[in-house]
Amino acid sequence: MNILSQLNSGMLYLICGAVILFVAVMCVVFAVRAWRAGKAVGMDTAKMRRAIVSSATFAVLPSVGILLGVIALSGSLGTPWPWLRLSVIGALHYETQVAEAAAEAAGLPGLSASSMTATAFSTIALLMSVCIIWGMVFSLFNCKSYTRRLSGGAVKKDGRPSALAGFGDRAMTAMFIGLVSAYIGSYIGTFVSGGGLFSFAGSWLPLAVALVGAAAMAVFLLIKEKGKADWVESFSIAGSMLAAMSAAIFLGKLM
Amino acid sequence: MNEQNKQRIYESYLERTHRLGRISVVITLALLLGAPFLIGAYLQAPPDLGAFLKGFLSIGLVYFVSCVAEYLIYVPMLGAGGTYLAFITGNLINMKIPCAVTARDIVGVKSGTPENEIISTLSIAVSSLVTILVLALGVLLLIPLQPFLQSPTLQPAFDNVVPALFGAMACKYYRGNLRIAAVPLLLMALLFTLVPSLTGSTSFMIIPSGAVAIGLAWLCYRREQREQEALK
């Protein structure tokens, strides 16, 4: 049995499906409690119904985008694990980055089914699980006191964080810029010096794929801004990735 | 119903929400951390803890900082119930936050009120359920497509998932932040060109690259703050 067949086995579907089922049940419990509490404090049920309908319709498009992420990762990690990661806690950009870094740490040349081993997979799965748990850990120990402090006025009237949190948002963007720069820099370095210092004989495929991804994203952003179509943003990352991955099939034949 | 009674019901709801939230988080953590070991046992290949530690020291630290920032920024928008659920179900930036804010705007509730707490929780719970449902249906349809997805023709596509993602993200994040992006990009391109063997440790290079970008962002932020103060 090859590694992808193992990663797509019934047992993995069962393990991942059980975790997803638990989270789905929790969502139902939280929703029912909130609905009952809303009625108990005298909220208009029509307003609550509007919130539910708007959230359900809003979530459909991004969910399809997330599904494309499952498809993108299924070629290297099988289907059940990306299904779990993207249904619970994860996010498309996070999962791919961590899976790549974990593959590197596990001694693989990259995130690819051709070099995947069972040990590498379980190591990747553990690293993907651990790296993103901090939001949950903080909410476990700090949510109660933090939300109480916030009710003391650290939030602006529109619900956004106060000036104190102003740099936090920028720091996060800057950190992603640093992260992306490291990888794009590595693709440039691979092309320029991968086949010998300044020989320009290294593989150009990752750099070309990244360029196609960037161009596709530019098109999505253009459509969003010029066409005033905000819904396009839900598909932008996954759509750009699929465009670049499709280009890789054709570009790979030129190598 | 008088205000005092309403407040008492709401306080009791919040108290029980925190208890339920903590229990849910503990169980979810146990399930998520246990799953890789369970899968490892099934595959007869437990995780390599040395490689795990190496990976964690590189990418894990970056995401620790990211999680701290996300937590501080998003909790004020989500409320208590919304926070527990959102951090369990993920996809915050691309779905939960805009979804909760949109629902709140549509209904017209103010932040910090019991109504906001209820609407945020409803919004995040419902959007999470929609995602779970869409993904479950999608995965069901994917099963017959697996032989096609595993064909050698498609392998270059799946081998280039990461460059595809970073290309798209570069466009998104560099746009409007060119002053911050130029230095780390040039620095990394130069480093990887001069020391090609570094490509095996790209995830480690995120730390210096991120530090340079954050340093530049801090300088820009301070300058803007000073300019704003001068205008007052």
Image (cartoon, coloured by chain):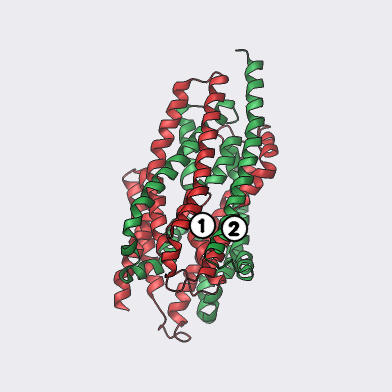
Chain colours: A red, B green
Q: Secondary structure at mark 1?
A: helix
Task: Answer with the quarter of the image where residue A209 lies.
Answer: bottom left
Which of the two residues, B91 or B195, is positioned nearer the viewer here?
Answer: B91
Q: Which mark is residue A131?
A: 2
Circles 2 and 1, Cβ within 8 Å, touching? The answer is yes
Q: Secondary structure at mark 2?
A: helix
In the figure, is residue A228 to the left or right of B20? left
Query: Measured from the top left, where is residue A167 in percent x and y?
Result: 61, 50
Disc 1 chain ID: A
Q: Which mark is residue A230?
A: none
B107 versus B200 height, above or below? above
Residue visible at 40% across and 84% down in the picture: A201
Q: Residues within 10 Å of mark 1 (few under 14, many from 20)?
A: some
The number of numbered discs placed on residues in the rendered structure image is 2
Disc 2 chain ID: A
Which of the two residues, A35 or A238, is positioned nearer the viewer here?
Answer: A35
In the figure, is residue B191 to the left or right of A211? right
Q: How far separated are the C-alphas under marks 2 and 1?
A: 9 Å
Q: Which mark is residue A94?
A: 1
Residue visible at 35% across and 59% down in the picture: A242
At label 2, the amino acid type is Cys
A27 versus B33 height, above or below? above
Query: Measured from the top left, where is residue A11 in percent x and y?
Result: 47, 57
Residue visible at 32% across and 58% down in the picture: B145
In the figure, is residue A186 to the left or right of B72? left
At label 1, the amino acid type is Tyr
Which quarter of the figure is the C terminus of chain B placed in?
top right
Specify which label sits upstream in the sequence, 2 or 1.
Answer: 1
